[in-house]
Image: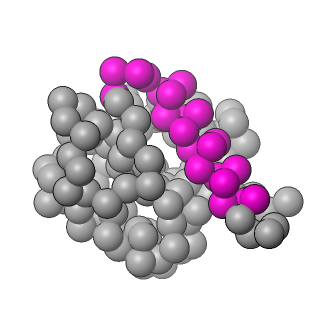
Amino acid sequence: MAVLKVLSLSFDEVVAQSRSTALRESGFIVMSTTQVASARVLLSREKFHVIVIGHRFSKNEKKSVATQARESGASVVLVCGASPEWEVQADVRVWAREGIGAVVGVVKKVLARQTRAAAA
């Protein structure tokens, strides 16, 4: 089975480290950044299966990164704060208040769907 690669875009370093650790412990290769510009560069240079976009970025930043990710073939997991932000195209939304465990669970489900679709 191929190793699945996740890009995590978090607003602050503490969340970035916690999310990356939890995803790595679940068996994923994780690249993490707190900068939108860095996420965009990584998306242009590498293949990711999923990107997790944190809730504290502006709507325009989330939209631009999500669009680029989808164009590159990555699924988008959008972490939502006060609003689901339907304007941002995402494959799955998860509420920030549900915690890192919920984010990891959603990533696992998205990747399982991708794996099943690829095998079909």
Which residue sits at x=21%, y=46%?
85
Q: Quadrant of residue 36?
A: bottom left
Image coordinates for residue 66, horizontal then vertical, percent: 33, 63
Judged left or right of residue 22, residue 92 is: left
Q: Is residue 43 above or below residue 10?
A: below
Image coordinates for residue 78, horizontal then vertical, percent: 36, 46
Which residue sits at x=80%, y=69%?
120
Name the one closer to the observer, 53 or 86: 86
Image coordinates for residue 72, horizontal then vertical, percent: 47, 77
Q: Is residue 80 above or below residue 91?
A: above
Residue 120 in view here: yes
What predominant SS class does the magenta segment belong to?
helix
Does residue 109 show up magenta in the picture?
A: yes
Image coordinates for residue 75, horizontal then vertical, percent: 50, 60
Locate the N terminus by quadrant. Answer: bottom right
Judged left or right of residue 113, residue 12 is: left
Judged left or right of residue 109, residue 59 is: left
Q: Which residues are magenta?
A: 96-116
> How many marks on residues?
0
Residue 62 in view here: no
Q: How is the image coloured?
A: one colour
Which residue sits at x=64%, y=42%?
108
> Among all residues in the image, which is located at the extreme right?
1
Name the one closer to the observer, 14 or 67: 67
Q: Is residue 11 above or below residue 69?
A: above
Name the one closer to the observer, 14 or 94: 94
> Among all residues in the image, which is located at the extreme front?
120
Which residue sits at x=20%, y=56%?
87
Name the one closer to the observer, 44 or 50: 50
